[in-house]
Image: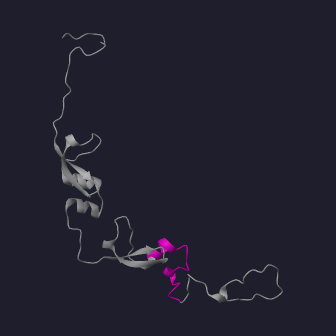
Amino acid sequence: KKETGFPTTGPQELTSFPTKPAEIMYFADFSNMKCSAESTSRKARWERGYETMSDCCEDNFWGDGRKECMGEDIISTQSVAMYYPDYGGRNCVEVDARTKQSWDIGYETKNECCEVHFSWDRSSICFGGEEEGIDTATPTSDILSPRPTPKPTSSSIKVTTS
């Protein structure tokens, strides 16, 4: 057909849009922590495919997750001890780093861990609360305040134990 110099209300001829044949690419499978080869025809347009497994793993997984995705052996025979905060015990404890998640932050020294996580509480076990014989969890009866009375008393402060 002849080209016109003005706009038309619709196409003058039916044209087919070029279609890309389905190809095999690598897609991230987050539930299994790996990249698997799949046909692009089975994927939504927003799902990103990669030409190589390596590219897919590098873009979608971090740390040990990347190694697992690539099929690398992430189990080490040597223990890597690091200090991690134990918030319930208000202390930093030595733990095998292989048992922690990739987002858990470990410290090489107990002091460094204590300063980062418990510097606000110098009476915590981290700073010797338990090791110096101070029980920071339960106060002893001789340092408890006396029980309140309905009326003021003339006696001096009296420690009572129940």
- Where residue 54 appears, x then y in whole percent? 20, 55
Q: Quadrant of the C terminus?
A: bottom right
Dividing the picture into quarters, in which one does residue 111 lie? bottom left
Tell me if I can see residue 99 in this picture: yes
- Where residue 144 appears, x then y in whole percent? 67, 84
Q: Is residue 15 magenta?
A: no
Which residue: 30% across, 41% down? 46
Vertical position of residue 94 compared to residue 100: above or below: below
- Where residue 12 appears, x then y in whole percent? 23, 14
Dividing the picture into quarters, in which one does residue 106 lie? bottom left
Q: Is residue 41 rendered to the left or right of residue 106? A: left
Vertical position of residue 145 compared to residue 19: above or below: below
Q: Is residue 24 rendered to the left or right of residue 111? A: left
Question: As rendered, which of 110 and 37 lies closer to the eye?
Answer: 37
Span colored in magenta: 112-132
- Where residue 73 appears, x then y in whole percent? 20, 67
Total numbered labels: 0
Q: Quadrant of the N terminus?
A: top left
Q: How is the image coloured?
A: one colour
Vertical position of residue 65 compared to residue 16: above or below: below
Tell me if I can see residue 51 in this picture: no
Q: Is residue 119 magenta?
A: yes
Dividing the picture into quarters, in which one does residue 21 lie? top left
Which residue: 47% across, 76% down? 114
Which residue: 25% across, 16% down? 11
Residue furthest right as drawn:
154
Vertical position of residue 126 compared to residue 32: above or below: below
Question: As rendered, which of 110 and 8 lies closer to the eye?
Answer: 8
Which residue: 24% across, 55% down? 57
